[in-house]
Every structure is written in C-alpha cells, then in structure tokens.
Amino acid sequence: MLLAVLLLSWRRLLIVIAAAGFLIATTGGLLWSTSFGLFGFKDTLAAPYAGLSLGVEGVGAVVLAAVGTVLVRGHNHSGQRNAHVELDRSGSRAAKGV
C-alpha cells in the first residue's frame, strides 16, 4: 500500500524500481512456493487466485518497466536545450530561444 501511495504522489525512478522489484519478488515467491515450498507450505498454481495473481503482477511489472524507461529517457533528454528554428520574412532560418 505504501508503494502505491508513493507511486501516485512521487514520480521518481527509485520508487518505480522499488515497486517493480516488489512485484517481481512476490511473483518469484509464489513460483518458489509452488516448486519447492516455502515456510513448510507448498502451494499450487491450481489455487483459486494464483493464475490471476501471476497475470496481474506480470502486467504490473511490465507497466512499471515501461514507466521507468520513459523516466530514464526523459531525464536524459531534459538536459538538452530545444532550439526552435523559424523562417523569417526573407526566407532565411533564424534560431529562436537559444
């Protein structure tokens, strides 16, 4: 719940990575418990919501990976200045905003 609140309030790469890591870890825990058992309990994928859980967490991890990629690309491009080029009345190019 805390990660969800942080994701909605702060759009920071560290929070996105933490939330994606949490989704991957819980998916890995479910798969581990179905294969080897966990804390003396062996789960099965035939459990009522196991398949739904894997699907939702998988989609969530993919969405967060996409958001992280957008944040990284936006951060890399934010340092570049955007020079707008316009044509003046004589037809020559004039850089604007530089």
Image: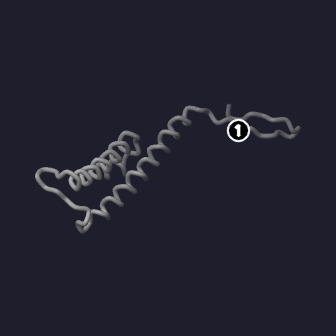
Q: Judge whether 71 appears above or below 30 on screen.
A: above
Side (left or right) of 84 relative to 45: right
Q: Nearer the viewer, residue 76 or 66?
A: 66
Q: Residue at x 32, y 58 (%)?
A: 54
Q: Position of residue 84 (x, y in %)?
A: 70, 38
Q: Residue at x 23, y 66 (%)?
A: 47
In the rendered image, the residue lying farthest to the bottom is 48
Q: Position of residue 90 (x, y in %)?
A: 88, 38
In the rendered image, the residue lying farthest to the front is 35
Q: Few, some or many C-alpha atoms within 10 Å of disc 1 (few <14, some 14-19, many ≥20)?
A: few
What residue is pinned by disc 1? 84
Q: Residue at x 22, y 56 (%)?
A: 34
Q: Nearer the viewer, residue 17 or 88?
A: 17
Judged from the image, the secondary structure of the residue bearing numbered disc 1 is strand
Side (left or right) of 56 relative to 2: right
Q: Residue at x 36, y 60 (%)?
A: 55
